Image (cartoon, rainbow, N blue to C red):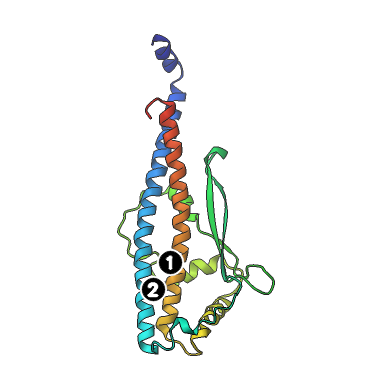
Amino acid sequence: MEDDDRCSSNNPGGIEQEEEDEDGTVLRFLDSLDSYLTLLDALSSTLRQGWFELASARHSMGSSRISSVLLDQKVRSAATTFQVGKSIDGSPSESHPSFAISKWASSRDGKCSFGEMEVSHVQKTSKNSELRHRGSSNFYDTTEEHDLRINASSTIGDGDVQKERSKSLSVFGTLVSPKLRAAQVSFETALDAIVEIANIRSSMLCAFTQLQQEMKEKGLG
């Protein structure tokens, strides 16, 4: 016991560093948990808005124009794809799955004309920010802000993006309700939120595992 006390008194800097590392792990876990709950609430709100806009579009255009019967069921190249990689927070032992989304993939050359959009930026910026409060009703405040964030990581212009969006809605006719376009953006936003939630959850589980390991090493687990 005396030896332990002597070691502790001889290495106060090491103990303080360990405590700071533990506090950082706890804060990272709590911040990820807060972000996870916030995004779940926002995703629910965004999906609800998307379904409401789709119902409004069907009411204005008629059920015959917005129906699964119009889909020809042909096999097509996916317009949106996902990639799974590894994200490292600090040391290699803290690596965890990281998810990215590629939109408007080109079927002509097999490449992503819209570019890859990695949505793990929230967990990167949240480390240096205060814990956020839950209660957010929208994943993005406005449609314009959503488009801005998407276009910031794109490799093509806004006109090409709108062209791709219109192309995907062409099955419902040349002239479609603005509500249908709004529903498209809402579901696109929800897709972004789902990938972001996956990244937040991955970071949260990594922090929780690390916290459990530290507790076991201290004999508290």
Residue farthest toward the top in the current orientation of the protein: 2
Q: Quadrant of residue 73?
A: bottom right
The percent coordinates of residue 105 (x first, y second) are 61, 70
Q: How many marks?
A: 2
Residue 171 % position (x, y): 52, 84
Quarter of the rendering containing residue 160: bottom right
Q: CA distance from mark 1 to mark 2?
A: 9 Å
CB under 8 Å between discs 1 and 2: yes
Identity of the residue furthest to the right in this view:
109
Label 1 Cα crowd, 10 Å radius (few <14 / some 14-19 / many 20+): many
In this view, 38 is above or below 81: above
Where does label 2 land, which residue? Answer: 50
Whether residue 54 is situated above or below residue 148 in the rendered picture: below
Q: Secondary structure at mark 1?
A: helix
Of the residues shown, which amino acid type is indicated by label 2?
Answer: Gly
Residue at x-position 46% and y-position 37%: 210
Residue 57, x across and y down, in percent: 38, 83
Q: Residue at x 38, y 30 (%)?
A: 221
The type of residue carrying mark 1 is Ala
Residue 87, percent from left and from top: 55, 48
Q: Which residue is tagged 1?
A: 190
Q: Earlier in the sequence, mark 1 or mark 2?
A: 2
Horizontal side, residue 16 vs residue 97: left or right: left
